[in-house]
Amino acid sequence: TSANGVSAFFQGLENKGLDSRALFPSKVCAIGPATSQALASRGIKADLIPLDYTTRGILASFRMKRIRGNYFLLVRADIATSELEEALERRGAVVTRLSVYKTILASKINEEVKEKLISGNIDIIIFTSASTVRGFFNLVGKNINNMRIPVVACIGPVTAATAKDLGFKVDVMAEEHTI
């Protein structure tokens, strides 16, 4: 999950009168350094952080590990893809998905931001997830032709692929998939 997911997950534990001890003897995987730091702030040291902060990176990290018969709890956003759980299940894992937060798209673009995009007063747009690309595209819609789209930066390959699919030219993609 993300750092937001860590916060939501532990809030759920607290609501049930539990704390980090409820995780014993489970192993914990963090998708990247921000999630690892969020876990550390709760007294949990991540047992695994993939070298590549993506679903594929997690799967590569598990390549040499015994998966069959192990139970996985995937703490995620409501819109996370099922790629990780399906791949783990194919390898014989028992997977439970727990959506701990909901991604809500804005219903309209801030007028100041819209004016800056039209006048060319924004130099870089940074997309931090595929959902931010889709959300932006849904907000600007037909107005995109009136806007001066600046440099587009994406946090990683999934986000970049979504941007390209929606017609954006991706100028920058982070080598390390963090902000």
Image (cartoon, rainbow, N blue to C red):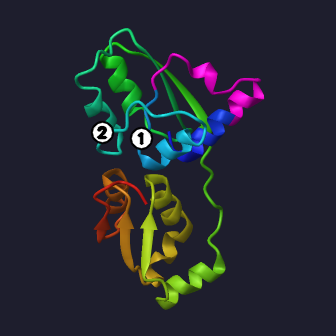
Count neighbours of disc 1 (C-alpha within 10 A) and say few if under 14, some if 14 to 19, many if 20 or more: many
In the image, residue 67 lies at what x, y percent? Answer: 32, 16
**Total tally of numbered discs in the picture:** 2
Name the foreground residue: 129 vs 63. Answer: 63
Res. 30 visible in picture? yes
| Residue drawn 43% across the image and 83% down it | 123
Task: State yes or no: discs 2 and 1 in contact (Cβ < 8 Å).
Answer: yes
In the image, residue 136 lies at what x, y percent? Answer: 51, 65
Name the foreground residue: 90 vs 20. Answer: 20
Which element type, helix, strand or loop, lies under badge 1?
loop
Name the foreground residue: 11 vs 55. Answer: 11
Q: For the C terminus, which image quadrant?
A: bottom left
- Distance (Cα) linking label 2 and label 1: 8 Å
Q: Mark 1 sits on what residue?
A: 31
In the image, residue 11 lies at what x, y percent? Answer: 70, 36
**Left or right of 138 in this view: 125:** left
Task: Examine the rendered structure and indicate whether residue 111 appears above or below residue 53.
Answer: below
